[in-house]
Amino acid sequence: MTLLNEYEQRQVAEAIARAEQRTDAELVTVLARHADDYAYLPLLWAVLLALALPGLVQVLLGWPGLRGLLVAQVLTFIVFSLLLRNPRLAGWLVPRVLRHRRAADLARRQFREQNLQRTEGATGVLIFVSEAERYVTILADEGIAQHLDERARAELVARFTAQVCAGRTLQGFVECIDACGELLSQHLPPTRRRNQLPNQLVILD
């Protein structure tokens, strides 16, 4: 998984500049490689499998004995601990609900850390993507929320998520930014020439 290069990051920044010429909204974009490394889950699965598999064999076949059972459990734990270090295999073990929860938490933290809650008129908008989780969300401050309602955001997020899943993250960013600019220009046309927050894409690698 490759995050956007410098040229692609400039395209995102240019899209933000275009959008902010049409509205008082302040757009910030964040792209994360992943929301969590979930390092504890492979170990948890290795422990569970080490407890369950040798015990199941013993119940069904009467083998191994107590000492053999302990050895089998230790060996099973070691084998699965090593196997599940593979990121692709480990990724299958993380429930979708947990992946999206972690990504949503990171998005909310980024909203605060990028100072979107401090814009004049409460006009901050965060467009957030976590690639590993294939998670996209749009968070809006109080001055924007009524103009960028849940239904509109859900449609934008659905289209962007499809682009991320297809490996077209850059295209998804540009289209989402343009769509936000178009929608917000109808309700919050530009009344000042002030760029309160940086336009460059924030990358969390």
Image (tube, rainbow, N blue to C red):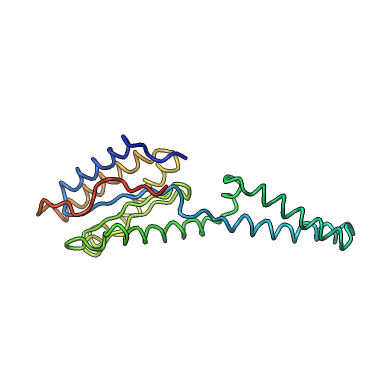
Q: Position of residue 113 (x, y in %)?
A: 32, 59
Left or right position of 102 against 191: right
**x and y, in percent, of residue 118 in the image:** 23, 63
Residue depicted at x 86% and y 58%: 68
Q: Residue furthest bottom?
A: 142
The answer to whether residue 69 is above or below residue 4 is below
Residue 48, percent from left and from top: 69, 60
1 left or right of 109 in image: right
Q: Residue at x 27, y 56 (%)?
A: 125
Residue appearing at x 23%, y 50% in the figure: 198
Left or right of residue 200: residue 59: right
Query: How many tags in the picture?
Result: 0
Q: Residue 58: image x %, image y %?
A: 85, 59
| Direction top: furthest residue | 7
Identity of the residue drawn at 69% across and 51% down:
80
Q: Is residue 100 above or below residue 12?
A: below
| Nearer to me, 174 or 148 | 174
Horizontally, is 173 left or right of 194 in the view? right
